Image (cartoon, rainbow, N blue to C red):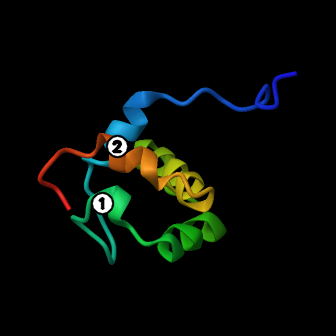
């Protein structure tokens, strides 16, 4: 029996964007998305994620961090970046 039958498939491009796209506004403007702190993402989760692509990325990042899956981002992060 497949335990993940209800899980949506992950678009690998989202993971790539999380380690390369910078936050376009706010307190953490210009920070790479995967470097945003979890409490900031939790705040967005409570208040509502922005519309559009950035909202999709922030929501995905929140789920990744909430479930302890940051290692997925570490594996694809470009060498030489902290």
The numbered mark at residue 23 is: 1
Residue at 30% across / 48% down in the picture?
19
Element on which disc 1 rests = loop
Residue 31 in the image, given as x and y percentages of width and height: 25, 65
Residue at 65% across / 70% down in the picture?
46
**Image side of residue 51 versus residue 25, left or right:** right
Q: Between residues 13 and 30, which one lies in front from this camera angle?
A: 13
**Image side of residue 5 versus residue 24, left or right:** right
Residue at 53% across / 51% down in the picture?
69
The numbered mark at residue 75 is: 2
| Residue lying furthest right | 1
- Whether tag 2 and tag 1 are in contact, CB under 8 A, the answer is no
Disc 2: CA contacts within 10 A as few (<14), some (14-19) or many (>=20):
few
Element on which disc 2 rests = helix
| Residue lying furthest left | 80
Residue 15 in the image, given as x and y percentages of width and height: 40, 39
Residue at 49% across / 56% down in the picture?
50
Q: Closer to the observer: label 2 or label 1?
A: 2
Residue 48 in the image, given as x and y percentages of width and height: 60, 62
Instruction: Report the label total.
Output: 2
Q: Between residues 74 and 31, which one lies in front from this camera angle?
A: 74
- 29 lies above or below 11: below
Task: Locate the C terminus and report the quarter of the image it occupies.
Answer: bottom left
Task: Locate the N terminus and report the quarter of the image it occupies.
Answer: top right
């Amino acid at each position: 029996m497949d335990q993940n039958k209800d899980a949506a498939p992950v678009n690998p491009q989202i993971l790539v964007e999380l380690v390369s796209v910078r936050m376009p506004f706010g307190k953490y403007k210009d920070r790479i998305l995967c470097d945003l702190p979890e409490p900031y993402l939790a705040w967005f989760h409570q208040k509502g994620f922005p519309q559009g692509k950035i909202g999709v990325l922030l929501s995905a990042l929140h789920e990744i961090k909430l479930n302890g899956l940051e290692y997925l981002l570490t594996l694809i992060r470009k060498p030489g970046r902290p």
